[in-house]
Image (cartoon, helix red, strand yellow):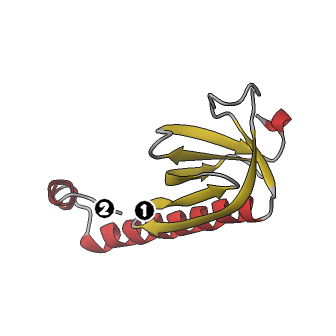
Amino acid sequence: MSLDPRVRRALRDAGVSEETLREAADAATADAERTAEQLESFFEDREVVYSDMDLTHSSDEYPEHAVEYADLFTHSEDVRGWLRFDSWGVYVEGGRVLSDEVVELTLGPTIHERVRFATAREEL
């Protein structure tokens, strides 16, 4: 967990030990690693997903995406990586699992939005 020096100092001044801060950082990092694994698994197990992304070239309310791969990693407590579809890809700046059927990713350039992906349109 990344805390700037002022926050760490304020927490220590408030009685939080360095060991407790380290344990919290380790827990946040482990949680991010689990999330990255779950998100990768969500996309690995599917050939097609649906999203609530607004695509200018699609008239579908929930467009279909043919999944090539998701390559995610962690940086401290952050989930980052790349999501590749059949004809395009996008940088992932964060994500979370909402259910077994739905995940939410924060997508970077050129999307710059939180987008939900689901196993079926009716899940969105």
Nearest the eye: 119 or 32? 119
Query: In the rendered view, does 47 fall on the left or right side of 116?
Result: right
> Disc 1 on helix, strand or loop?
loop
Residue depicted at x 51% and y 68%: 73
Q: Which mark is residue 2?
A: 2
Q: Count of labels shown?
A: 2
Q: Is residue 19 left or right of residue 65?
A: left
Q: Quadrant of the C terminus?
A: top right
Separation of disc 2 and disc 1 at Cα? 8 Å
Q: Are marks 2 and 1 in contact (CB under 8 Å)?
A: yes
Q: Residue 10, percent across and down? A: 17, 54
Q: Left or right? Give the position of 104 relative to 109.
A: right
Mark 1 residue crowding within 10 angstroms, few (<14) / some (14–19) / many (20+):
some
| Circle 2: element type | loop
In the rendered structure, which amino acid carries the disc numbered 1?
Glu
Q: Quadrant of the N terminus?
A: bottom left
Q: Which residue appears at 26% of the width and 59% of the height?
A: 3
Residue 47 placement (x, y as % from top left)? 81, 58
Q: Nearer the viewer, residue 102 or 63?
A: 63
- Residue 76 percent location from the top left of the image: 39, 67
- Judging depth in this view, the residue of 64 and 25 nearest the camera is 64
The 10 Å Cα crowd at callout 2, few under 14, some 14 to 19, many 20 or more, is few
Task: Examine the image and state in which quarter residue 29 appears.
Answer: bottom left
Mark sitting on residue 98 = none
Amino acid of disc 2: Ser
Residue 41 lies, in percent from the top left, at: 71, 65
Q: Residue at x 25, y 71 (%)?
A: 18
Q: Residue at x 68, y 46 (%)?
A: 98
Q: Which residue is mark 1?
A: 77
Closer to the chain start, of discs 2 and 1, is 2
Q: Is the residue 89 above or below the residue 54 in the image? A: below
